[in-house]
Amino acid sequence: MVRRNGRGPRQLQDVSEKFRRGEQRLLRMLEEEGLISAREREGLLRQVSLAASQKRTSEVLNAAHTVHNKIVQVLRKGRGPAEERGRAEIEILYEITRLTQTWEDKEKLFDHFLGLVQQAIPYRDAALFLVNRDEQRLAVVAQRGQAVDLIAGVKFDYGFGFSSWVAKQKSPVLLSELQRGRRPEGPEVGSFLSVPLIVQGELIGVMNLSHPRTKAFTEEHLRIAILVAGQAAGAIQRLVMYDEMARLAITDDLTGLWNRRHFGGRLQDEIDRARRYGTCFSILMLDIDRFKAINDGYGHALGDRVLADMGRLLRKSARASDIVARHGGEEFIILMPMTDKEHAWMAAERLRVLVADHTFPRRKKLTVSIGFASYPEDGPSAQDLVRHADQALYEAKRSGRNRSAASRTAAA
């Protein structure tokens, strides 16, 4: 029985549960405000919970769209003569909800969001930052006008600049009477407004607005910015969750490599391409020698660290065109386009030596056995190629480990 190190399914479950809790809180707020009935809330919540339990991106999107459509209906009902003053705000909130349901190009979506803000707040320069979840740093995802930062050289928890300070404080800032001309570089700034995007205490990003004229932004503008940022934060969080769920569906969480299912699809694509243009390619299958001894002797925690380190090593050594995946347990597989059997053997040997020279966690020295097969000589189908590469790997293992073997050839 092969031991499976990795936490992909658990991560997918966590993302689904986070989505469910966020939608639950949103529906509860709508009920508390008297915008929906308890019966409506229960019905919508059942749809959300069912979608989250199925852990499929399509089901989650459908459930989110159902909730968002309900919000749109509520906003539309709120348009009456007594609410004319807030009509622009409602239009912006409605449009934010619509955008997240219909736009697939996130770069254009975020730029359009800044355009919506400009309808209510007359800025000249603007930037939208989102938190990079892997690095916990702010990254610019949209910008209009020039880049503005009042303290660009100062570093905080989320990176450099005023936006990172606002991110750390999680509080909005309005500066309406800045001294003109005090910055040697960059655009002139007389008014500056920075608002964090927060959902359930979690920082999603920061929005910065500026204007060369003093007192261009008022307390009313600050209120609108906070309102819009709150709505945008929820929408952006859902987009991030969708991306995370999609990523988890095709990658191995422990190593960061593609998973077996995604590799299978890419392998079939490469077969179709090679058949169409008459080209060749090879696949390498490698297995960590005596990996079971690490799990049994030092525990799965060290085993996970070794697998993660192996993933980084393989990704770093691969060509830009190569597809590197975790095949299962301690096995990895690499698709090498435009590579015949002779060059596959050379690549396998380079990789085998690279691993043997590498020092893994806890100063461990490890080796790998590698089997490889090539298209078209080792079979016309993905199943044929994988089977022959696996047989060659078995031959490398049987012949003493720490060696490479080609399909239908003697061990190298």
Image (cartoon, helix red, strand yellow):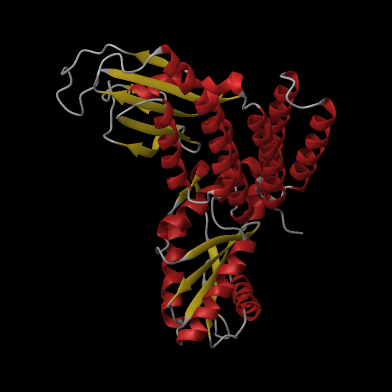
Q: Above or below — where is 365 with respect to 197?
A: below
Residue extending farthest front: 81
Q: Residue at x 68, y 41 (%)?
A: 64
Residue 299 in sight from this viewpoint:
no
Foreground of the two, 133 or 70: 70
Relative placement, left or right, of 151 versus 70 is left
In the image, residue 100 lies at what x, y percent?
A: 56, 42
Residue 205 in sight from this viewpoint:
yes
In the image, residue 37 lies at what x, y percent?
A: 81, 26
In the image, residue 400 lies at what x, y percent?
A: 58, 70
Quadrant into which the N terminus falls: bottom right
Number of numbered markers: 0
Foreground of the two, 62 or 199: 62
Q: Residue at x 60, y 56 (%)?
A: 250
Residue extending farthest right: 39
Q: Above or below — where is 306 with respect to 130?
A: below
In the image, residue 345 lies at what x, y percent?
A: 45, 76
Relative placement, left or right, of 148 versus 330 is left
Q: Residue at x 52, y 41 (%)?
A: 362
Relative placement, left or right, of 246 versus 322 is right
Relative placement, left or right, of 238 versus 144 is right
Q: Above or below — where is 367 with respect to 132?
A: below
Foreground of the two, 44 or 273: 44
User: Residue 33 appears in which quarter of the rendering?
Assistant: top right
